[in-house]
């Protein structure tokens, strides 16, 4: 039996009991008389139905939200919040005796209110000032200052990876070539986003997330530079992209991404961006009108008579009058080269036509 069904049954019983009590209050008697049952039974049924309907909103959905928030919180904040809660409850316990001696109803209510207030204050203070407190106690959680200090030396500058470039996977191959010199930092909130995608109910998103986790494992095993998963976070920002931009500004390091929107936002805020798609377009084979290329025509083009092929780097070649050469490798004379948002496109004529 699932948690959703269990919660529905429990709340159905609880609200049914509440409905029975309300019915007896309306009837003016708790005795099992006909007049009492006339009110209590309908009220019980109504309460049970209400309990079954509101169960997901009172139990399973809040529980999922709590799990999502806890999964995204760094370990430092969870530990700090737990310690703050314990300290707050200890302070509240010390105040129980003097508060309970107050005249009624204050002596009955204030101890419970004190536990709630001091527990909340303990959690809030510890989370907001966790970095200062751990510094004061000589803690070693703060990795941000260490990374900054290392980046100021002669060592290569680190780079931040976002979820899109991890899922894409080409960064694993690029890291092996030596073009990325510094350590690659993956913030915990980026890793949480990839895990959240991998747990998605949508099969396409779930497959993309799992591919990202596989690529991350490959990156950690085969990368020529260190891959560091860090708990550094920007607590005042909620969105992952905004956190990444602010963290890059603090560390004075670039972001590696394939996300067009993140690329634009980061550049507007003065953050350097290394775009894998831009790199792929830059290293594609450069051809000029009049040159000859050898290409395999594999498909029909959009216009009548056109054939389509691809170079080894994935560049699309549109062959005019090339439809009859499908499944053949031919020499094509380049007539035009177009640079689009999707990449470079080459147009040409078959050399077999004598053009």
Image: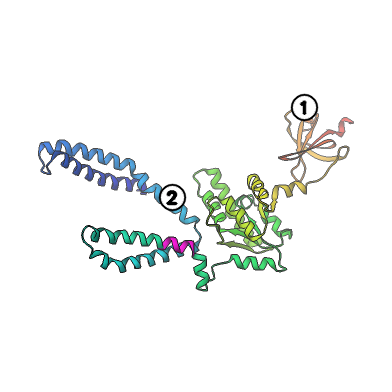
Q: Is residue 125 magenta?
A: yes
How far is mark 2 from mark 1, CA to CA?
Answer: 56 Å
Which range is magenta? Answer: 122-129
Residue at disc 1, secondary structure: loop
Residue at disc 2, secondary structure: helix
Q: Which residue is mark 2?
A: 65
Point out residue 69 in the picture as x, y percentages from the top left corner: 46, 53
Quadrant of the snapshot with the C terminus = top right
Predominant secondary structure, magenta span: helix
Residue 54: quadrant of the picture: top left
Residue 188: quadrant of the picture: bottom right
The answer, for residue 2, to whether it is visible in the render is no
Residue 122: quadrant of the picture: bottom left
Residue 133, numbered circle? none
Is residue 12 found left or right of 220 in the rendered image? left
* Rendered view: 330 above or below 148: above
Q: Which residue is mark 1?
A: 305
Is residue 24 found left or right of 243 in the rendered image? left
Give the foreground label among 2 and 1.
Answer: 2
Point out residue 165 in the picture as x, y percentages from the top left corner: 64, 51
The answer, for residue 206, to whether it is visible in the render is yes
Point out residue 119 in the picture as x, y percentages from the top left corner: 37, 61
Front one among 124 and 40: 124
């Amino acid at each position: 039996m699932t948690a959703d069904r269990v919660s529905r049954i429990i709340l159905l019983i609880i609200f049914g009991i509440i409905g029975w009590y309300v019915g007896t209050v309306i009837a003016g008697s708790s005795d099992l008389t006909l007049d009492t049952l006339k009110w209590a039974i309908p009220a019980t049924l109504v309460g049970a139905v209400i309990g079954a309907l509101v169960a997901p909103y009172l139990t399973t959905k809040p529980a999922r939200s709590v799990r999502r928030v806890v999964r995204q919180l760094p370990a430092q904040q969870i530990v700090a919040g737990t310690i703050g809660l314990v300290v707050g409850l200890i302070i509240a316990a010390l105040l129980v005796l003097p508060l309970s001696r107050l005249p009624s109803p204050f002596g009955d209510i204030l101890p419970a209110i004190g536990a709630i207030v001091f527990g909340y204050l303990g959690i809030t203070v510890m989370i907001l000032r966790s970095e200062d407190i751990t510094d004061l106690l000589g803690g070693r959680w703060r990795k941000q200052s260490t990374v900054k200090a290392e980046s100021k030396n002669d060592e290569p500058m680190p780079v931040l990876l976002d979820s899109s470039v991890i899922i894409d996977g080409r960064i694993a191959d690029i890291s092996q070539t030596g073009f990325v010199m510094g350590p690659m930092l993956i913030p915990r909130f980026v890793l949480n986003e990839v895990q959240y995608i991998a747990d998605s109910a949508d099969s396409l998103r779930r497959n993309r997330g799992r591919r990202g986790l596989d690529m991350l494992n490959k990156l950690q095993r085969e990368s020529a530079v260190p891959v560091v998963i860090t708990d550094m976070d920007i607590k005042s920002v909620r969105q992952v992209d905004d956190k990444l931009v602010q963290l890059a500004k603090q560390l004075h390091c670039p972001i590696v991404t394939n996300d067009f929107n993140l690329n634009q936002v980061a550049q507007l805020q003065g953050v350097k961006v290394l775009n894998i798609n831009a790199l792929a377009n830059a290293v594609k084979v450069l051809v000029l009108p009049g040159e000859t290329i050898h290409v395999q025509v594999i498909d029909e083009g959009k216009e009548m008579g056109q054939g389509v092929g691809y170079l080894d780097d994935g560049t699309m070649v549109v062959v005019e009058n090339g439809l009859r050469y499908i499944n053949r490798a031919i020499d094509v004379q380049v007539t035009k080269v177009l640079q689009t948002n999707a990449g470079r496109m080459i147009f040409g004529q078959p050399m077999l036509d004598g053009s």
